[in-house]
Amino acid sequence: MAQSTDSGVFRQFVDEIDTIPFVLGALITFVFIGLAAVRTELVSQSISSAFTVFGQGLAWLYLLSMLLMIGVGAYLMLSPYGKIKLGDGDPEYSNFSYLSMFFSAGLSAGIVFFGPVEALTHYSTVPTLFSSGVEAGTTGAMVPALAYAIFHYGISAWGGYLAIGIPVAYYVYEYGAPFRTSTVLLPVLGAKNLDGVIGRTIDTLAVVATLGGIATGLGFIATQILTGITYRTGIQFGNVETLLAITGITIIFTLSLVAGVDRGIRRLSDFNVAMMAVLLLATLIGGIVLDSISGAAVLNTGVLAIGTYLGNFFRMSLFTGIGTDGGAVWTSFWTVFYWSWWIAWAPFVGLFLARISKGRTIREVLFTAFVTMTSVSVVWFTVVGGTSMWLQQTGTADILGAVNQFGDGVAGYALFGALPLGELWQPLFLILVVTFFATSADSSTLAVAMLTTGGKEDPSSINRVFWGVLQGLIASILVVLGGASALRSSVIVTGAPFAVVCVVAMFVFMWKLAKDHGSPLVDGERTWIRSPKGAKTSTSADDGNTMVAEDD
C-alpha cells in the first residue's frame, strides 16, 4: 500500500512537469554546480568580472526600468483603474495575514540582514551623491546614510514585484490564465501561444532569475545565521561546513512548505511580523535607557532622512555615478545590486502576491506595497539602523568593529547584544533570522515549482523539495566562492533580462486595461460599469486546469 502511494506521488511529480522550463532551469543549475566544483577559480573570477561588466555597464537599464515601473504603478493606484477587483468574492486572507505574507515574501531576506548594517555602512562611508561637504563617521553623515537605506527598501523595492504580480492576478482571475510568468504577455501572445517560443523563453528566464535571486537572499540570511552562531559560540564554519549547513537548513525549511500556504507560510509570516515588532520596541526603548537623548535623536534623524529621501527621490533613482570619483562603483555595489535583486525576485514574489491577492482591488495591492510596506521599512530602518549609528557615534557599542571582524551579518547581534537585556534579544534576533529564512525558502520553492509546472497552484511535494535542495546548493556555493560579493554579482547577472520583461509587462497591462475598460482619460467614470470583453474560460478535460479561450 505504501509503495503504491509513493508511486502515485512520484507519478504526480512527473506528470505535472512543464518540460522546457523545468529541464532548462535544472540543467543550468547543475552546470553551474558542476563548474563550481571542478573549475572553482574560473567560476570565482567570472563572478567578479560580471559585477563590473553588468553592474556598471547596465546601470542605466536597472535604474530607468525601476523608475518606469514605479511611475506606471503610481498611475494605476491613483487612476480609476485602481477600482478594478482581482477576482470575485472576499479576500482569502485577513488583512494582518495578508500584510504579513506580503512583507515576508517581498522584503524578508534583505530587511533583516541589512536593517542593522546598511545605514551604519553609509555612515562610515558616505554615499557618493551626498559626499560633498559631509564627513564620514559624524552626525552629519547619519541623515544621508539613513535616507539611502530607506530609498533602497522604499517604494522602488516593489516595482518589479508589482509589474508581474498585478498583471498575472488580473489575467488569472479575470481570464482563467495559468499562474505562469509568461502570462504577463497574454494579451499580446494569446492563450495558445503561451506555450510557444516566446512564452517558454520568458518562463525559463523567470526560473533562472528566480534561482539567482532567491539564492542571493538565502545566502545572505544563511550567512547571518552562521555568523550569529560563530559570534555567540565561537564555532567556526569552513567551506565544507558552510555548504552542508546552508543546504541542510534550506532542505529542512523547504519541508515545512508541504504544510501548505495556510499552515506554513501564513503562520511563519505572522510570527515574523510579531517578532519584528518586539525587537523594534526593544531597540527603541533600549536606546533610550542607554542614553537619555538617543530615542529622540534616532527619531529626529529618521524624520530628516525621510525628507531627504522624498526630496532627492529622482536624483537617487537616476544616479549612475558616471563622472564622479568612485560613484559608478558605489552605485553598482548598492543601488544597482538592490534593483537587480528585486527584479530577479519579481517572478516568484509576483506570482506569490497574485496568489494571495484574490478578492482585492488593484489599488489595495498597490497601496499595500507603496504605502504600508514602505512605512514598515521606514520605521524598521529608522529605529534599528538609526540606533546602530547612534550607539556607534556615542561609543556605547563598537558595532563597526564587530562587522570588520565577522562581516555584515553580525551587526544585528552586536546591536541587540549592546541593549539592556541583550542576552534575551540576541537569541530572539537569531530566531527571527531563522524564521525569515524559512519563509523565503517556502515562498520561493512554491513559486519555482509553479513556474516549472505550467502554473499549477499546488505543485507536488517532490517538486518543491527538489528546487529547495538546488536553491540551497546554489546559495552555499556562492557564499563559499566569494561571500557577499559573489551574491551581489550573481543576482546582477540573472536579473538583467528580466528588467525588460517587467517593463514590457506593465505597458502591455496598461494597454489591456484600456481595451477592456476604456481609457479613463477619454471615457471618465462611466467605463467602470463595463466588464472585460473576451474573458471566456473553459476547463481542460485532461487535467482540470482552467485555460483561457482566445479573444473573439
Image: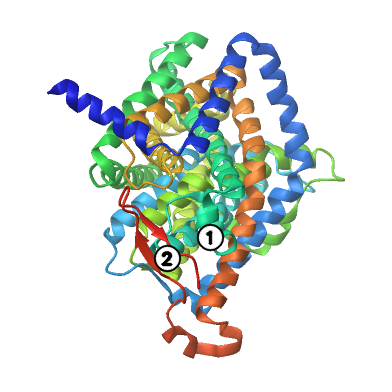
Foreground pick, 263 / 114 = 263
The residue under label 1 is 186
Instruction: Answer with the quarter of the image where residue 503 lies.
Output: bottom right
In this view, 127 is above or below 65? above
Residue occupying the point 73% across, 38% down: 55
Residue 140 in sight from this viewpoint: yes
Q: Earlier in the sequence, mark 2 or mark 1?
A: 2
Residue occupying the point 58% across, 27% down: 28
Residue occupying the point 49% across, 86% down: 527
Q: Residue furthest right?
A: 323
Residue 238 in sight from this viewpoint: no
Alpha-carbon distance for marks 2 and 1?
10 Å
Crowding near the residue tagged with mark 2, few <14, some 14–19, many ≥20 C-alpha atoms within 10 Å:
many
What is the secondary structure assignment of the residue under circle 1?
helix
Mark 2 and mark 1 in contact? Answer it, CB < 8 Å: yes
Instruction: Answer with the quarter of the image where residue 272 lies.
Output: top left
* Rendering coords of residue 363 (x, y %): 45, 70
Foreground pick, 100 / 395 = 100
What is the secondary structure assignment of the residue under circle 2?
helix
Instruction: Answer with the quarter of the image where residue 344 lies.
Output: top right
Q: Locate the N terminus by quadrant.
A: top left
The residue under label 2 is 175
Foreground pick, 333 / 266 = 266
Does 103 sit left or right of 198 as displayed?
Answer: left
Residue type pointed to by label 1 = Leu
In the rendered structure, find residue 19 and report the number of the disc placed on it: none
* Rendering coords of residue 515 (x, y %): 56, 76
